Image (cartoon, grey):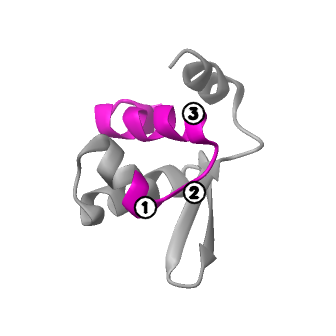
Amino acid sequence: MKVLANNRRLAILHYLKQTHEAAVWDIAGEIRLSFKATSKHLGILYAAGIVEKEQRNVMMYYTLAHSLHPVTKFAITTL
């Protein structure tokens, strides 16, 4: 999948695999990327069905999607 061919997105997935859930600010700080760029990468992952999102007050929280394509699931488990 082309979506997984980006090191920043792989770093996001690795972080979500460890934390199970994180706010955009936390993810941005962990991967040392701006809030705006992190949000853009998360939007791409969300559009591909790889992450799920939930808004709480003003913060958006992300988790790995529960139902993933087998190839995507394999790629994430090898992170």
Spatial distance from mark 2 to mark 1, Cα to Cα? 7 Å
Residue linked to disc 2? 62
Who comes first in sequence, dot 3 or dot 1? 3
Q: Secondary structure at mark 1?
A: helix
Who comes first in sequence, dot 2 or dot 1? 1
Neighbourhood count class around disc 3 (C-alpha, 10 Å): few under 14, some 14–19, many 20 upward: few
Q: Residue furthest right?
A: 67
Q: Is residue 51 above or below residue 57?
A: above
Picture quadrant of residue 42:
bottom left
Q: Is residue 14 above or below residue 79?
A: below
- Could you tell me residue 79's position as x and y percent? 50, 20
Indicate the amino acid at tag 1: Val
Residue 28 appears left or right of 54: left
Indicate the amino acid at tag 3: Gln
Residue in the picture at 71% in, 25% down: 70
Residue linked to disc 1? 24
Q: Secondary structure at mark 2?
A: strand
Closer to the eye: label 3 or 2: 3
The answer to whether residue 35 of the structure is visible from this angle is yes
Residue linked to disc 3? 18
Residue 43 appears left or right of 65: left
Question: Badges 2 and 1: C-beta atoms under 8 Å apart?
Answer: yes
Residue in the picture at 61% in, 20% down: 77
Q: Nearer the viewer, residue 61 or 76?
A: 61
Q: Which residues are magenta?
A: 1-26
